[in-house]
Structures are given as structure tokens and as C-alpha cells.
Amino acid sequence: MVALTTRLLRASWSSTLRLPKSVFPPRPSPASNAEFLRRCTNDLYAWQQSSHSAPDANGKIPETFTLHDGPPYANGPLHIGHALNKITKDIVCRFQVGQGKQVSYIPGWDCHGLPIEIKALQAQKKDHADTDAVSVREAARELATRTIEEQKAGFKEWAVMGDWDNAYKTMEKGFEIRQLEVFKNMFEKGLIYRQYKPVYWSPSSRTALAEAELEYDENHKSLAAYVRFPVQIPDWMKNDVFKTVEGPINAVIWTTTPWTLPANKAIAVGWDIEYCVVRYDVDGPENTILAASRVEEFQKVLDRPVEIVLSGIRGRNLHFSYENPFQKANGLQTAIQADFVTDSSGTGLVHVAPGHGMDDYHVCNAQGIEAFAPVDDGGAFTKDAFPEQPGLLEGLLVSDIKRTGSSAVLNYLEQHGLLRGKHSYRHKYPIDWRTKQPVIVRATAQWFANVDGIKDGAMKAISKVNFMPETGRPRLESFIQGRSQWCISRQRAWGVPIPALYRILDDGSLEAAMDTEIIQHIIDVIKERGINAWWTDAPGDPAWKPTYLDGQYVRGKDTMDVWFDSGTSWMLLPQKADQPVADVYLEGTDQHRGWFQSSLLTHVATQSFKTDDVKAPYKTLITHGFTLDSEGRKMSKSLGNVVSPSQIMSGELLPPIKRKKQKGVKQEQLKNDVPAFDAMGSDALRLWVASSDYMRDVTIGQPVLISVNQALHKYRVTFKWLLGVFSLPSCPPVFSSFNDLRVDLAGKDDLAADPSQIKNLADKLAFHRLSQVSHDVHQYYSKYEFYKGVNMINKYIANDLSAFYFETLKDRIYTGHKADCQELQKMLGLIFYELLQMLAPICPLLVEEVWDHAPESLKESSVHPARSPWTPLPRADWPTQASLNETQDYVSKINTAIKAAQERLRIDKKMGSSLECAVTLLCGEDRPVDDWFGSHFSKAMGSLSDAYELNEVQLSELAGLFVVSKQEEAWKSATKDWWAEERFAANESREKAEVSDWVVVHKASLEKCPRCWRFQKEQEKELCGRCEDVVKEEGL
């Protein structure tokens, strides 16, 4: 009977409580996703473009902000790297919209080049050799067009906003024309030239490659060899330096590319290296020149005794000639001196093939030695590799895994007694970034951009750029400084043509022709006929030849490097007289040698690059890392560790949701059900990105994703509760606009509102903490350190709100005076709106959904949080802030001590709810004169007197702050019923003085109120005094 009466009493009083309720769902609803997506992407972007173009109320034109999109390749499905890239850019843009700026973000796609061409041919099950250029271009265009639409849909699903209707594509006619105009500008400045010289060549792709198109195999296996060349010493040396040496003399070189020996043009020595002559027996005595420091190593290679017969010869005094056994018709070749020769490896004598090495080319070119490369486009020897016996080498591949070419060369040398050793050698070696096959260095006639000519201007330009992280600066500088030229021609069909004509000479060979008039004429014809006509028109169509040219001409077949394509994309942006065209470029760290560099070089090349006014195309250069699995490994299909963005959105990488047991459903049926996952949509993907320190490599795995989903759920629970507080039927908010409320409570701009209008200490501390978080998060976002801002938001919601402030105020909302509840609604309204503004760049769909559930009356008079300028909350003066910081610290220490004591009592089963206890705080020697607690908190709670003693109202407020039933006066004794104590140091000075403070948690002296559950009721009363007052005033 007693239990029944208690339940009836509780039921009757529960109807008098203000319990927040909201229909806000625990997870996003797929049914409403499309609408929220449209509002926070297309609508928001269009709105800010329009509204931020006009002067504001003060007549000020809003600032502009341009993030220029580095175009992804239109050749495959989206992966997690795309998500990291595109979402980070979107967060940057959304934050800038919140700063009142007019943001320009035009997405783009890189449509040309080998990757797309190869994939298009693979889809048609065709080889490049079996397909004409027109068919290749049609297939590649079709693939790129289809892929763009697929990728665009994915980007939009991730809530990436931008000018999608005007997205740029490098295969569009307008883009191609602008690109050709940049080429013409560079040609007119003497920066474009054609030359027969070595370039990186991919036999697997049958095209030249730029350095940015290379990757490196750190463990490549080569066949290395020691090869001797019989040499002829000049008579004057033979009779002087070499007079003690009897018999023929040889020079021994060491090479890791024996296939380049048919192209040998010289042997290089080091100017100051000491050389010697050694003698050993190989089918008879043999004299060989090598560096003195390499004798011991050479002896190991020969595996026989070696005797030094002559020493002390410096490279500058060493002269000899020799014969290339594969090119005997060329006659004798000479030894030359080269700076790149060292004696740290090999023999100190270097085989030089100017057709297969850049250093070799430069040293030979300076001495009039021509480059020679008897290798064809497919990486096979031509007949010129061994004119005397063409059948021996012709057609053999030089870079295949079997090392066919090198083996054939070494077999011939061994047969003729010229091989002195061979071995496998592992080293770093360049590979084609797409086919992953080895590349070679091969001399061909190519078009180049002169980087040496603009290098100084490029260095000046980036000296004014802000790099994030700063390590990007030396990285980009090193790439620029280490580059003298840029091979911009490719032997592919899918691209923008190099605007060159070729004259047909009498012998049938072609001679390149290019001048300003030819380039402009070609541009004009392309404007009229379209770029495809370059390939579809008849080879001798006269329309392409300017009238002043005599003779027969054909169009070239080379296309431009795709880095030249995307590198000229800055031409899309409005030019600024004294500023870079873009505020931010943001891409992966690999783009220092790719898009960042090509954009810089083309932009600098079109300016007066010898002046100090030269500019980069970007103010700030931000780089992000790569995505790795939870073990720090790169993602690859072979490892099976690839994570797709859709898996994060669907929640399928998380443990399945545990189903609740249902009546009438057998356990076996539940086991057979398809598992359900915690799908949080694109906000889960976005929050993972925002939570990542993206300037480093970013890991992804189940532990990370679990924490992301937990944070999202915490956001939703927090907003659901707040929405319920604003929708209380018996206590509607007294404010009508979140924006006006912000001004009333916090102030405007940098002018803080009067802090004394906030009466309750918990509310004062809540406002102070919110102001701190607002400033810190804003500062982190401003520095593009979004993960720090998100981390702070997460801690704020979990610790400051959920675990502390919300706990302290639930009693005031549910059971307190209506006026107090309405005051709380103001503070919670401020927190609610500030949280939405902080999360608007990160989780726009969540913000849109929360705003959709806000009371209509409040929405009508408020600006959407994503459209209202977000500035940090104004802060009080420094003395007030310092005082509140001190109070905050005291409250934290006291609260921690109380919780520790309560937990011990719970373990001993002495108490359950924290409302069952009261708290006494003992200070120092338990005398009022030492009562820092009373002194500090009486002032903190608005007392105007100097009295140390807290009044009953203040003690009751403190009890609410610590969620206990009563806060006893500091120097009174605790009850002897049950209790627990916890010592703590109130501040540093008391700790140093070894003065102890402690809290005593003990049984509350009064009885439990059936309405508010606080132990504040007198025995003879039905309710506690406060509840009686509330019931009376509200007529409940």
C-alpha cells in the first residue's frame, strides 16, 4: 500500500514538471536528406554569392575569398583521398562564408592525359597501336564525361558546395584556348624551345614523362657490371707518366645500366681524384686504370690478387682514347672530365652516354659531343645499337623484368673478354606513376619550357606565400631549384596539341616550325573548327598553314603535358592587379612537384618575372597528407585495406547495431536477420575529415570511426535536449530571436554586455566557458587547424555541458521557478546558436536538420546560423575574466573532490543519487578568518559586502551547482550518520603552504521532496519550500 501511494504521488507530481520533448531523431532520416542537402549546398552557395556581393549596412563591400580547386583526374570512382581533399576544401569555404566573405569555389576536372587514355582503351579492349588518334580521343572523352558526372554526384552527396553549374573541365574548348594563349605568351618570351635531348621515357606508355609523373621503386633490381675498355695513351704520357707500365692499358667502368653501353660516347674522370694502374691476371697479365680508393673493392670483384704498379695520377692529368665495341665506325672516343664523378662507388671512371642521362648530356653538350639513343618508343634496341651486327641487339627490350637488353650486351662483352664482373644491384629507380613499370632516360626531340629562365622569379614569388605546414616551403623550393627545364610534349592523342607545324623536307624528314604567327593562326582555326579538327582534318589541309609559309607542312602529333593543362587553370580566375588570383590552393603533398609547381611556373612565366612584383597564383599553399589504414599502411587492393567513403557514411565499418529482444521473435530469427549499421550519413565522413590532422598522413580504421560516430551521437542528443527545452508548452522562451539574444547577453562586436545581468553563478561560468571555447575554436578555424577546433567542441559538449552544466540546471528547468527556467532558456539559446555556428562548416547537414526542428517563432526572427556572420563571443575585461577563471578552477577542484567521495559511498552502498547527500567544505584550520571559500564565492555570487559568510540563498545555489541537496557552511561539522571525505588543494599558494582543504560528503539532514527529489523537505510538509512556491505561482 505504501509503495502504491508513493507511485501515485510521483505520478501526480510528474505532471507538474517541465520535461523537454523533441521529435528530433537519433539518426538522420534518408527521406529528408535530399532537401537538407539542397539547402546547405546549392542554396547556400547561391545565397552567399548574391548577398555578399552588395554593400552591407555600413556601406562596406564584403571581402572575397577564392579557393582554387586542383582538378582530380576524371578516370575512376571516388576514394577516401578524394573525401579528405574535397571536404577539407569545403570546410575552409564554409568557414569563410561565416566570416561574411563572398566565396568563390569552382570545382574542376583534369580530363586529358595518359591515365584516362589507357583506361578508355582498356574498356574497349584495344591497344594503342591498334587504334587511331580520333578513336582514342572519342573513347577518352566519353570516359571522362561519364566519370565527371559520377564523381560530381559523389561530391555533392558529401555536402560539398560550389559553383557546380560552371565547373571547369580541361577538355572544354574555352579552357584549351586559354591554355594555348599561355603557351603563346611563354613562347614570345623565349621560354619554349625544341631540342633533341634526354628525357624520362616510359616504354610501357610510349611517351615522354615529366618528373611529376614519376614514382620511385626503392628496391629496384638492376644488373650491374664492370666492363673494361682497351685504351690508347698519348705518346707524351706513355713516355712520361706511364713509362714504367709494361703492356696494354685498360680503363674499367661500373654501370647499373649495361643496355646503355652501345650509346657510350665518353669515359669521364674526376678532376682531383687520384688514379692508379693495377695489374692482375685474366688469361694473362692485364693493366687497368681505376681510382686508388677503389682498388680493394675491385680486387673483391675479380676475386684474384691485384698489384698497384703506378699511383699518384690526378684526374686532371689523365688522358686517353678508346673504342666503343658496339660503335667501331665512330672511331676513337676520348676521356673527359666531369664534376659528377666520385670515387665513393664503382671504379672512379664513369661510362658516359649523353643520349641516356641528363648529367651525361650536359657535360657532352658543352664539348660538342652529340647525344645518341638507339632505343625505340617501345623501349627496344634499334639496328643502330650495333650497326655491324644489327641482329644481335635489334628488338630486344632494355627495361623488361628479364633485363633482356642488358644480358645480351654483357654476353657479347664476355665473349670478347671485356667483362670483368657482374652482379645484381638494388637501388632506387624511377617508374611510370600509372603503369608502375620502369622508365628509361632516352634522347628524343621534345618541346621544353625553360625553367632556368624563370627560376629566380618563381623563388621571389613563393617568398611571399604562406605555407601550411611551413615544411612545404623548402620542399617546393627544392623542386624548383633542382629543375632547369620542363619537358612539356607528350606522344599521346588525348590532349591539347603542341601548336607546331612541320615542314616536309626533300628527303621526307620533318622540320619543326613555330613562331608567334603560327601559334596564333592555329588558335584561330581551333576557335573556328574545334580542337578535334587538329586530328580529323586531312594532314595537308591548307587551312592550318599561315599564308606566308611556303612548302608543304603537316600538323604535329605531340600533345601538352597534363600538368601544363591543369597548371594554367588559374586563367579561369579574375585577375587582380596587386594580389594573387587565389587566396588558397589546397592539395596533397605530392603536388609540390605537380600542380603547385606547374601553376607557379606558368603564372610567373606570363608576368614580368625579372621584377620584384612577380606573384604566385596563391596567397596560401596548404598541403594534406595521404590516407593510411589503422596500422599506418598505404591503402591498396592487394592488402585488402581499402576504405571507401560510402562505407563510412553507411556505418558498415562499425560493429552492427545490437537489436533489442522482441516479444514473439525467436533468437534464431534475430541471428538470421541482415545486420543493421549505425548510418550517420555524410556528416560522419565530414566529421572524420574535420577530426583529422590533415597536414600529416591521416589514419582511418574502426577505432577512429567509432569515436567519430560517438561524437555525432553526442551532438544529436545535445541538440535534441536543447530543442526540447525551447519547446516547453508551459514555459515558452521569452526571447524571439537568437541573434538579438546574442547581443543582449554577450554584447556586440568587441563590446561585451554587462556581465552583472547574469545572476546565477553556474550561468556566469557557463557563459565564460562558452566565450573561451568560441574564441579558441574561431582561432583554430582561422588557422585551418580544424581538428583542434573539433576536439575542443567535443570536449566542451562532453565535459562542460553534458557532464557539468546541463546536470546543474536540469533541476531548475524541470522543477524550478518559471522565471528561472526562462532565464536558463536564454543562456541555452546562446549556447545552442553558438554551437550551430561552430559546427556549420563541419556538419552542415546536421545543422540544417537541427535548424529545421527549431521552433518556428524563433526561426522566423533569426538568421540561419550558416548564413549569419560568426565572430567569437565578446569577452569581459581582463580582471573579470581572471576572476571567473579562478572561480572556474575552484569549482572544478571542489566538484572533482565531491564526485570522488560520492563514488566511494556508492561503492559502499551508502548512497545512490547525488541528491541524497549534503556537502560540507572545510577550509584550512576551520576558522572563518581562513575561509577563502566564503570570501571568494560570496563575491563571485554578487555579494556587495565584505562578509565571508554565505547566506542561505547562496548556499542553495551552490548546492545546485554541485547537484547535491545542501551545501553546508564551510566551518560547520558534518553529520556522523554516514560520510566520506576527500582532500584537495584549493590553489597553488595553499598547496605550497601545506594547508589542506577537504570536502565531507554526508547524509542530507532533511527528507526527499516527491516533486524535485531533493532532500530539502521538512518532515511535516508535503513538498519542499521551493516546490510549494512553484506549484502555487503556476497554479499546478
Image: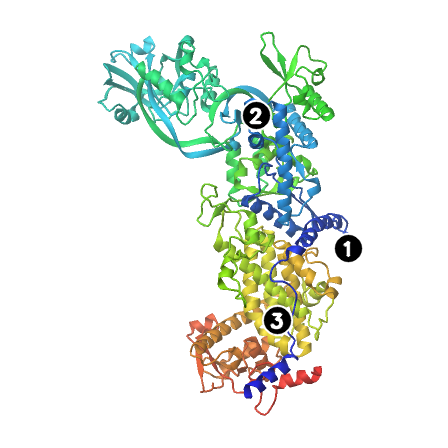
Q: Nearer the viewer, mark 2 or mark 1?
A: 2
Q: How crowded is mark 3: few (under 14 residues within 10 Å), some or many (20 or more)?
A: many
**Position in image of residue 611 (x %, y %):** 62, 32
Label 2 residue SS: strand
Going by the numbered disc 3, the residue's amino acid type is: Lys
Going by the numbered disc 1, the residue's amino acid type is: Ala
Q: Name the residue under label 1.
A: 57
Image-quadrant location for residue 554 = top right
Report the Cα–Cα distance between label 2 and label 1.
55 Å
Q: Nearer the viewer, residue 547 or 342?
A: 547
Residue depicted at 69% across the width and 50% down the height? 101
Dots 2, 3 in contact, CB < 8 A: no
Report the Cα–Cα distance between label 1 and label 3.
32 Å
Q: Nearer the viewer, residue 755 or 805?
A: 805
Residue depicted at 58% across the width and 70% down the height? 805
Up/down of 183 relative to 712, above or below: above
Q: Mark 2 points at which residue?
A: 490
Image-quadrant location for residue 860 = bottom right
Labelled disc at residue 953: none
Residue depicted at 52% across the width and 83% down the height? 968
